[in-house]
Amino acid sequence: MRNPHMTENDVVILIPARLAASRLPGKPLADIVGRPMIAHVLARAQAARLGPVVVATDSDEIRAAVEAAGGQAVMTRADHLSGSDRIFEALTQVDPAERIRIVVNVQGDLPTLAPADIAAALDPLADPAVDIATLAAEIRRPEERTNPNVVKVVGSPLSARRLRALYFTRATAPAGEGPLYHHIGLYAYRREALTRFVALPPSALERREKLEQLRALEAGMRIDAMVVDSAPLGVDTPEDLAAARKILGLRD
């Protein structure tokens, strides 16, 4: 259950977005049913009604697209190595007084993400032992089990809808008789956890798997995942973009 003492003044949603994606350059500005992808993600984050939503970018073009959609964007350095580094810089700009307690990192390439799932990510933070919360969905398609582009979360079930994450991997995760879970790259950080995380050097397992959340686990930080009904479409390739256009075209 979400902390009943948490208000909109305690939470900010930050969306890192840059143009230099290797597999689909310029993807935040890619047109999806008449709007750039970043505008779709912005609208879904706003619909979660958790608090202010800000796009963190190094691109004047992205900033202009966000502002044209009625949103707020802040400019960040171009040399950040990760989205978490970018949102931390943005946080220092939008909240220099350090009043915000929870920082939600929503990836800018999830145009079909459900607003209710964004809100669900905050639920584990009602437990003071949890540093970072995230999302997962049960893998139902056999081909996803072995797909290295599908990140899997391995964890201990705490309830029907919550896992304590023990590991994340691109490899085929051990299955046994239980379900496998697709990790959804959305994070809700306690502010102090994000501050600690970005100060840590890349870890051995992080470099091996190319998954920065392993840095937090190796440092002894606790990550819990809420299980939602399905994974949103992540847009990384032209084929993904075509699929997003089809999905959102049908909805609209």
Image (cartoon, helix red, strand yellow):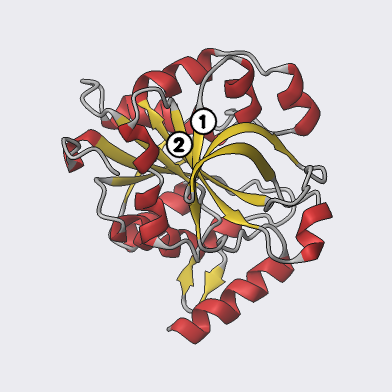
Q: Which residue is mark 1?
A: 223
Amino acid found under the numbered disc labelled 2 = Ala
Pick the residue in front: 199 or 89: 199
Label 1 and label 2: CA atoms lie apart by 5 Å
Quarter of the picture containing the C terminus is bottom left
Per the image, label 1 sits on a secondary structure element best described as strand
Identify the amino acid type marked 1. Answer: Ile
Q: Residue at x 51, y 83 (%)?
A: 249
Check disc 1: other Cα within 10 Å, few if <14, some if 14-19, many if 20+: many
Residue 197 locus on image (x, y percent)? 51, 19
Residue 81 can be seen, yes or no: no
Foreground residue among 64 and 137: 137
**Is 77 displayed left or right of 138 in the figure?**
left
Give the image quarter of residue 212: top right
Name the N-terminal-most of marks 1 and 2: 2
- Nearest to the observer: residue 114 or residue 178: 178
Q: Is residue 108 above or below residue 58?
A: below
Asked whether disc 1 touches disc 2, contact meaning CB atoms under 8 Å apart, the reply is yes
Asked whether, in this view, residue 170 is left or right of residue 80, the answer is right
- Residue 100's x, y, as percent? 25, 29
Q: Is residue 143 above or below residue 244?
A: above
Which image quadrant for residue 98?
Answer: top left
Image point (82%, 42%), residue name? 171
Q: Residue at x 50, y 66 (%)?
A: 112
Asked if residue 251 can be seen in this view, the reply is yes
Q: Name the residue beneath numbered marker 2.
A: 133
